[in-house]
Image (cartoon, grey):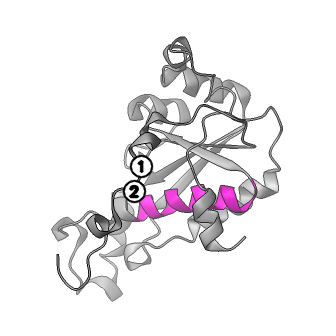
Amino acid sequence: MDLTEVVARRRMVRRYRDTPVDPRAIERIVTLACAGPSAGFSQGQSFVVLTDDGTRRRIAEIAGEAAYVAKGFDAWLSTAPVHVVPCVSREAYVERYAEPDKASSVAPGEWDIPYWWVDGGAAFMLLLLGAVDEGLAAGFLAVDVRALRELLGIPEHVAPLGVVTIGHPEADRRSGSLARGWRPREEMIRWERW
């Protein structure tokens, strides 16, 4: 698949077939996400890959899946065969920019933009696109960060971004958000000036 096709096929999936996912495919997806950009090559992104049924069900509980199902939706988090928790660490950037080759650069504490979040978003997108490239699908959900951190033993200096689910897609209800359609491109893309 070329990149244009991968991007066109990418969507947030919330229902998966009860089919195992090849661990080598997950390894390739997460390895791809590790190759995302990072300011100063700080490499402050990390990932927790979850395939254990009990852990995935516990995350579904933390996320309130029962209430989601009560609204008429299919179970999602508890049935997705793989969860990946992308994380970022501000401290990795602070440490990197204290190294001799970066000491003359603007320090992370003085940045207008916290680039660890930008880099985390790039890694997150690579997870989504990598899943599509492997013939799989992915979804995303923000989850109570404190509960997720406690469940998975994530250190305080590492911030989980949420949960990316990965699996073989099953037909599901299309998002009502899609009815609003794309904003006109001229509102999204400007040339030379705003």
Dot 2 lies on which element? loop
**Dot 1: few (<14), some (14–19), or many (≥20) neighbours within 10 Å?**
few
Q: Which amino acid does label 1 sit on?
A: Gly
User: Was residue 8 drawn as part of the magenta stretch in this picture?
Assistant: no
Question: x, y (%) of residue 189?
Answer: 31, 72
Q: Quadrant of residue 17?
A: top right
Question: x, y (%) of residue 193?
Answer: 17, 81
Separation (CA) of disc 2 from disc 1: 35 Å
Query: Main SS of the magenta segment?
Result: helix
Tell me which segment is drawn in magenta: 119-135
98 to 51, vertically: above or below: below
Q: Where residue 153 is drawn, which disc sits there?
A: none
Name the residue beneath numbered marker 1.
181
Name the residue beneath numbered marker 2.
89
Counting residues from the start of the chain, the first of labels 2 and 1 encountered is 2
Question: x, y (%) of residue 42?
Answer: 42, 72
User: Was residue 121 drawn as part of the magenta stretch in this picture?
Assistant: yes
How many marks the image carries: the answer is 2
Q: Give the residue displayed 47% in from the left and 69% down from the top.
A: 43
Q: What residue type is labelled 2?
A: Ser
Question: x, y (%) of residue 8?
Answer: 59, 61
**Dot 2: few (<14), some (14–19), or many (≥20) neighbours within 10 Å?**
many
Q: Give the residue displayed 62% in from the left and 47% down from the top.
A: 138
147 to 83, vertically: above or below: above
